[in-house]
């Protein structure tokens, strides 16, 4: 995550310093380790959206890396983690549970082409009392939400937008993929920015479907990201080519195209019109 405050917002992933933490931990964790990609779980095969995806961390390594990063985050946030009976925590956890349950729907996994076989997710959600407009989901399912984002997400559908986007990153093994790329070295900075934008757009796409299948209104995803762009307008914006996020305009157009598709998919699922997966 980036060092953001209530007056300046990182678009849209909220996850720069956490990636740095993950990559630093990965350098320590992987020293002397074999990081050959797993045969199961999509190692060198097709990733979400059926694009090529290389994952260098084994499933157990991915989980351990996320847990280590999570411990670091909670240690830094000691004294500001809200108790379980806080209404804000209950609200966030309730929405997260619904999104996580939607992520378990096999036809949806198949449509998105998520590779989850062999990977373990130990879901956990904590809310930190800080003004940062921030949220993230680490590998293995550890979720942290900062209270600064709650007023921006004006209703449960918009908060589901945030959680679905961040959970999508974990389901798509994006941190694993970025760590793997960082280990290869020599990546052109402009190509890396474009790669980051592709992951962000992918998380947007997956997120819209997740929130819809969880029973939330995907149209609110458009409204939420519009609000985020307005909050962010107070700070300087980098040109899109220098940003690892899609432009606001590009994001809005894509969201508006995905909303009817997500609704149609959910309706087909509810009506039993989606064929079951073929037997293995």
Image (cartoon, rainbow, N blue to C red):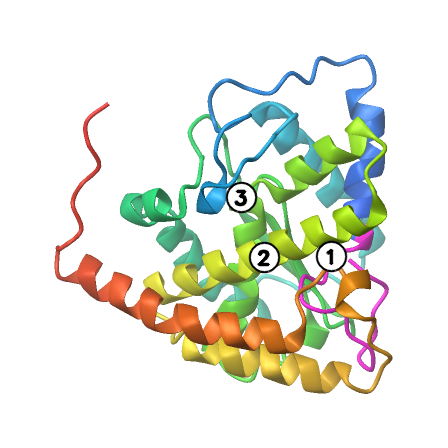
The image quadrant where one finds the C terminus is top left
Q: Is residue 55 left or right of residue 95?
A: right
Q: Residue at x 18, y 41 (%)?
A: 276
Viewport quadrant of the N terminus: bottom right
Is the residue marked by circle 2 packed among few (<14), some (14-19), or many (20+) residues within 10 Å? many
In this rendering, which labeled residue sits more in front, label 2 or label 3? Answer: 3
Q: Horizontal and vertical percent for residue 217?
A: 38, 76
Instruction: Work out whether residue 91 can be spotted.
Output: no
Q: Position of residue 28 (x, y in %)?
A: 85, 26
- Residue where numbered disc 2 is placed: 166
Instruction: Determine contact: label 2, label 3, CB under 8 Å.
Output: no
Q: Can residue 260 be seen from the camera position used here? A: yes
Measure the alpha-carbon separation of dots 2 and 3: 10 Å
Tag 3 or tag 1, which sits nearer the N-term?
1
| 91 up-or-down from 232: above or below | above
Q: Are marks 1 and 3 in contact (CB under 8 Å)?
A: no
Q: Which mark is residue 15?
A: 1
Mark toward the start of the polypeptide (2 vs 3): 2
Is disc 3 surrounded by few (<14), some (14 to 19) or many (20+) residues within 10 Å? many
Q: Residue at x 82, y 82 (%)?
A: 7
Which residue in the structure is indicated by mark 3?
172
Give the overall secondary structure of the magenta segment: loop
Discs 2, 1 touching: Cβ within 8 Å: yes
Element type where label 2 sits in the image: helix
Residue lying at the far left of the rendered structure = 272
Within-10-Å neighbours for mark 1: few <14, some 14–19, many 20+: some
Q: Earlier in the sequence, mark 2 or mark 1?
A: 1
Magenta region: which residues?
Answer: 1-17
Residue appearing at x 85%, y 81% in the figure: 235
């Amino acid at each position: 995550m980036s060092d953001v405050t209530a007056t300046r917002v990182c678009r849209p992933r909220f996850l720069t310093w956490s990636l740095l933490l993950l990559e630093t931990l990965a350098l320590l964790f992987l020293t002397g380790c074999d990081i050959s990609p797993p045969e199961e779980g999509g190692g060198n095969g097709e990733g979400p959206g059926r694009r090529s995806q290389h994952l260098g961390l084994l499933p157990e390594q991915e989980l351990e890396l996320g847990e280590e990063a999570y411990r670091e985050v909670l240690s830094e946030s000691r004294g500001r983690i809200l108790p379980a009976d806080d209404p804000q925590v209950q609200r966030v956890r309730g929405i997260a549970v619904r999104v996580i349950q939607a992520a378990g729907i096999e036809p949806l996994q198949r449509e998105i082409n998520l590779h989850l076989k062999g990977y373990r997710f130990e879901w956990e959600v904590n809310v930190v009392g800080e003004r940062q407009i921030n949220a993230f989901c680490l590998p293995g399912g550890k979720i942290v939400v900062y209270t600064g984002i709650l007023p921006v997400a004006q209703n449960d559908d918009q908060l589901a937008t945030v959680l679905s986007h961040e959970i999508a990153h974990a389901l798509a093994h994006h941190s694993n993929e970025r760590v793997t790329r960082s280990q290869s070295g020599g990546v052109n900075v402009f190509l890396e920015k474009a790669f980051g934008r592709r992951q962000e757009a992918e998380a947007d796409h997956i997120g819209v479907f997740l929130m819809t299948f969880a029973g939330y209104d995907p149209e609110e995803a458009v409204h939420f990201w519009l609000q985020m762009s307005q909050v962010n307008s107070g700070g300087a914006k980098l040109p899109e080519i220098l940003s690892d996020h899609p432009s606001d305009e590009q994001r809005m157009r894509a969201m508006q195209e995905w909303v009817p598709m997500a609704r149609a998919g959910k309706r087909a699922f509810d009506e039993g019109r989606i064929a079951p997966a073929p037997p293995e």
